Image (cartoon, rainbow, N blue to C red):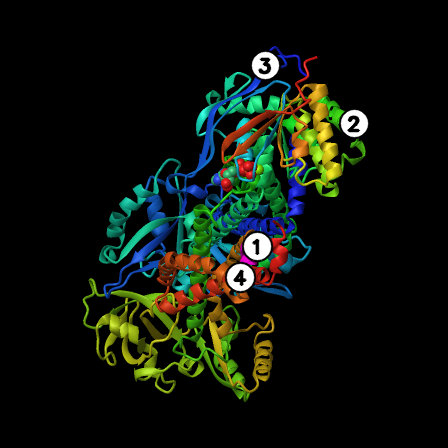
Amino acid sequence: MSESDDQPQLGEPIYELRGVSRSFGSGFNEAHVLKGISLDIAQGEFVSIVGPSGSGKSTLLNIMGMLDAPTRGSCYFMGQATHELSERQRVKIHRKHIGFVFQAYHLIDEMTVYENLETPLLYRKVKSGDRKSKVADMLDRFNMVAKKDLFPEQLSGGQKQLVGIARALVIEPRVILADEPTGNLHSSQGDMIMDLIRDLNRNDGVTIVQVTHNERYAAYGHTVVELLDGSIDSVSQVAGQSVQSD
Amino acid sequence: MVKQYVSLAARVLRKYRLYSAINVLGLAVGIACCVLISIWAREELAFDGFHENADRIYRINKVYTPTTGGRELHALTPGPMAGALLDEFPEIETATRILPSWGGMLLVNGETSVASQDVLFVDQSFADVFSFQMVRGDRSSALTTPASIVLTTSMAQALFGDEDPMGSVVVGGGDFDYTVTGIIEDTPDNSHLRYNALVSWSTIESTADLLNYSFLERWLPQTIYTYVMLRDGTSAGAVDAKLPDFTATHLASRADQYSFYLQPLSDVYLQSRDVLYQRSMVQGSGQSVRALGLVAFLILLIACVNFTNLTTAQATRRAREIGVRKSLGAHRRQLVTQFLAEAFALAGLAAIVSTVLLEASRPLFNALTGKEAAAFFWVRPDILLSLAAVWVLAGFLGGLYPAVVLSRLQPARAIKNVTRTKRRGGLQTSLVTAQFAAAIVLIIASATVIRQMDFVQRTDPGFDREHVVVLPVGRTGIPNQLDAFKAELLESPGILAAAATSDVPGTSLSSYSVLPEGRSADEGIISDAVFLADTDLLNAYGMQMASGRFFDPNRPADSSAIVVNEAMVRSLGWTDAVGKRFDRVGEDHQGTIIGVVKDYHQASVHQEVAPIFFALERRIGALSVRVADSDVSAALGAMRTAWERFEPRYPFEYSFLDDDFAALYELDRRLMKTLSFFAILAVLVACLGLFGLAAFAAEQRTKEIGIRKVLGASATSVVTLLSRDYIRLVLVAFVIAAPLGFLIAQRWLDGFAYRINVGPGTLVIAGIAVLVTALLTVSTQAIRAAHNDPVKSLRYE
Ligand SMILES: Nc1ncnc2c1ncn2[C@@H]1O[C@H](COP(=O)(O)OP(=O)(O)O)[C@@H](O)[C@H]1O
Ligand SMILES: [Mg+2]
């Protein structure tokens, strides 16, 4: 992890959502997808968002990832209101702190495993030497050195998602936003991915916000937030799970 | 980063092979066409530019306004004009006179004789005005003494082989001894003035009295060419302004009919289509240069439009990738760079392929231009530079638009791939419409040219131009034994008639000044074309009399009689011409009109049939022989035998009149070939782009089509669904293109006195041709999509 001054302490809020609403379209067609969501997420916390399909989970995650903006309300990331940031600043924070993991992996088909991992570093303008060692570390860590020159279509689903997580992790982000990371995987692969995510949270202190449909996987987190029709239906603590503060 | 962009671009190109191939091919063809045309156009535009003082050299032309109406441009000037100009105009540094030897000249060195087409009598100042390179001899004096001749390198080689020709004697025109005083380079390809040999002007002056060459001192008739070189810093306008006074002084009686002007040397080759009486000069067509320049631009435009459209279409399917990249922290500028890199790679590939096409199209290029291009003729700094320029231009055109549009996509949506790009963007639609409009304009233009050329082919010339063999006897000794020669020819059963004439139809005639009856000597004099012929003219050419009779060999008095054509009668406002008097000015020659020949096309159908009069006079340029169509080769054999007996020094030569006539339309035919070739290419390139777009649209709508089929749609209805948009698009293009094409075609036709009209038929056929081609292109894709297994396409979800 980087030793920058702005590193918040474990337990301090990383996300503070205040009355976040998001609607699409206008007039008769206006669809209110999120309706006044308020939610705090602490540094090092592992949050699972659950809820029926169409309840607004992905939309919420996109807003947290600055890929989308609320129509009303505000979202504070590490104390800064995202809507007050310029495009440039937003991209900068995004690059530095946020890693995405998608249900459909969303690897870039035309690039090898190695290049997929390298891309976020290129966007961050990391020097060639550092880039090589960081990518090499990731490949090592996920046992994919032998697969580094393969293209995504040559990998199994689980392997693809491993690359997806490695790609999110290579920039050493403060938070990983994972939208149904196991949604397309067999249960054994799913377990493997979830164990990995839990390890990241426990050992590296990475904040995790995941969307899942699987109750068992939801219980990997400390907190389960249930969305229903664009509103928070309930927030519950998972028994036996608490934020590590060692 | 750059390395990644490049290798990624290469992989993307390979992955979407079809689109890349279409894109590269279309653009490469566009670039190649553009380069070919511009090479040709630049050479045409640079004609005569090699003369050191090209910008100060002018040819004197005149506007001739006959009192009988009409307006003609002539290149001919009076003999004393050059001297008078030099005396009276301080602006003029040098003036030089040129007189091409009539019918060329036979040059003989001992046993060797060579017929030379273009032998020019020129002043010594010819060497000061023009920059043709002297290979041997003294540039400043070679053309000074009478009977000096300067041969071209080829002519010297042909006459003397490896011997040194300098100082040797060459016999010219049968009996005149010339001394070789120099060797000059062969006429450069890009010179409008053609020569095989130059003879000193003083030669004419020394023999003028002998031959009664009154044209040297008199202002009428006008038979020579005058070129002037102005002093540095003076303007042609100043000279032009003073020329009317000059004419009034020297040609008082005709000042209102003759208006001299300076034509810049740079215009002489391309802008002289309407200038009559240009001998030993070649002509190009400025109109063709403009037309093909426009074509080149349109084809490049079409190719660039393809490129933009295809890269845009191609890029929209990468919306998800863009969303992902944004989620990985890509800044917009970085995405724009990525797409530009891909477009540049593609355009670069196209530029490389275009050079291969260029080299491969060399034979075609030669056929189109009538020139000989060397291998790798395109490897020239200017062309390589313009290739680079087109590369950059196409790269930006093709890359910038998709790059900017896509990088602006909202990432959250892009990842979901809900980029609801309407079926086709407004820009894309307008671009494709413009493309098809351009293609339709080109087709209308070339269809018009083709139809007009067909019309020209079918126009009755007013005489029978088939089965006439022309023997260029003018430069031989045959005219001296004409009657015996003709008699021998006519013994051959295949030879029906033979006429000795000054010129033949299809070439330009000389002009005489005459005073028709009933007009005052002050302003009634007219200068018109004269056809000097013997009594067999009508038999040889099959022309018809409108009234009266032609010259009769049995009436000696006919030697002073005159025959005119119908145009002459019309221009003089007469109803009946027969019996009217017609006096030659300056000569003691008074004639009576004995007959009127029906109008025939002496010149090309570009020109209105001009007034002509016929005189029975021996100045023989050619012998026209009418042969029976049963055995042309036997007739030719008889001609050869006779020729070789009468004129053994001079190799037998002949041509068919209809070939000579066809040469009149060489420029038009070349335009027809090039224009229709490029029009077809333009349509193909446009369709290539359409094919790509249609394939893309069909692919994008795979799911929709699948659902429709599951719901029971027939294959036909699916094809209709996919093709409907394109029909509308071609229709809009037609509405734009039809009036434009009409105007352009009509403008070209204005250059013909006898012409077709651009009817609605041509327009409609052009529209239908493009529509059908477009539909065929689109439906291949639509049919494939319609026959896809719907379940398979839905399983994608
Ligand atoms: N870009 C968009 N435009 C219009 N509607 C959208 C857009 N994104 C999401 N929606 C709508 O918002 C609702 C919630 O979507 P989403 O957040 O993806 O739900 P979940 O992830 O919980 O299934 C859905 O009804 C969806 O159609
Ligand atoms: Mg979702």
Disc 1 marks which amino acid? Thr
The Cα atoms of the two marked residues, 3 and 4, are separated by: 57 Å
The Cα atoms of the two marked residues, 3 and 1, are separated by: 50 Å
Horizontal relation, residue B427 to residue B364: left or right: left
Residue B276 found in image quarter? bottom left
Furthest residue toward front? A239
x then y, percent, for residue B6? 66, 36
The Cα atoms of the two marked residues, 4 and 1, are separated by: 14 Å
Residue A66 visible within the image: no
Give the class, few, some or many, for how many residues have Cα within 10 Å of label 4's Cα (few <14, many ≥20): few
Q: Nearer the viewer, mark 3 or mark 1?
A: 3
Determine the secondary structure under disc 4. loop
CB within 8 Å, label 2 to label 4:
no
Q: Earlier in the sequence, mark 4 or mark 1?
A: 1
Residue hosting label 4 = B711
> As rendered, which of B791 and B776 lies closer to the eye?
B791
Q: Are marks 3 and 2 on the same chain?
A: yes
Give the class, few, some or many, for how many residues have Cα within 10 Å of label 2's Cα (few <14, many ≥20): few
Q: Quadrant of ligand 2?
A: top right
> As rendered, which of B32 and B517 lies closer to the eye?
B32
Q: Which residues are magenta?
A: B702-709
The Cα atoms of the two marked residues, 3 and 2, are separated by: 32 Å
Magenta stretch, main secondary structure class: helix
Disc 2 marks which amino acid? Asp
Determine the secondary structure under disc 3. loop
Horizontal relation, residue B607 to residue B324: left or right: left
Residue B409 visible within the image: yes
Residue hosting label 3 = A12
Determine the residue positioned at 33% across, 79% down. Answer: B597
Disc number placed over residue B702 in the picture, else none? 1
